[in-house]
Amino acid sequence: MVQSWSDGLISLVANVLYKQFNKLNLMQLTETEQKVIEKFEKFILEKNPSNEFLVQFIELAGKYLNLETIPDYAKRTGKSYNGIKNNRNIRNLFNVKFVIDNE
């Protein structure tokens, strides 16, 4: 079977999400949260959702996490890059450092 570029992209995104989820410290997740991640991964691998679905899912998660890159967060808050890097919850997603500020 010939794989189209969109199928390849979906597979790539699924693999990236899988790697990101596996990097999570599962000890910090509840049993229910672990099950949700496992079921979502299974859904991605078995149902091959559209790119648009995956993008909207990532955007939704970013919205709830209040994700911002460090430079954007620094500009908005008037604080230094290094101050934020050393004193905020920073996560590396897709090789980009983000501030998680949802509290």
Image (cartoon, rainbow, N blue to C red):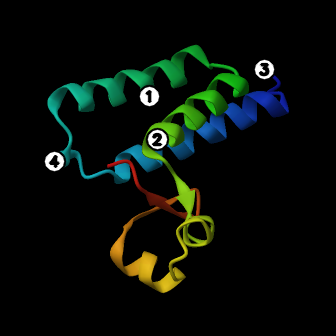
**Residue for point 57% across, 14% down:** 47
Pair 1/3: label in front: 1
Pair 2/3: label in front: 2
Pair 1/4: label in front: 4
64 or 36, nearer to the observer: 64
Q: CA distance from mark 1 to mark 2?
A: 7 Å
Which numbered disc flags the more N-terminal residue, 2 or 3?
3
* Above-or-below relation of 90 to 80: above
| Amino acid type, mark 3 | Met
Q: CA distance from mark 1 to mark 3?
A: 23 Å
Name the spot of residue 33 as percent of width and height, x first: 25, 30
Q: Which residue is mark 3?
A: 1
Q: CA distance from mark 1 to mark 4?
A: 18 Å
**Residue for point 62% across, 71% down:** 75
- State yes or no: discs 4 and 3 in contact (Cβ < 8 Å): no
Q: CA distance from mark 2 to mark 4?
A: 17 Å
| Amino acid type, mark 1 | Glu
* Above-or-below relation of 79 to 39: below
Which numbered disc flags the more N-terminal residue, 2 or 4?
2
Q: Which residue is mark 1?
A: 41
Extreme residue toward the front, this view = 78
Q: Which residue is mark 4?
A: 27
Which numbered disc flags the more N-terminal residue, 1 or 2?
2
**Residue for point 66% across, 33% down:** 55
Which numbered disc flags the more N-terminal residue, 1 or 4?
4
Extreme residue toward the top, this view = 47
Q: CA distance from mark 4 to mark 3?
A: 40 Å
| Amino acid type, mark 2 | Tyr
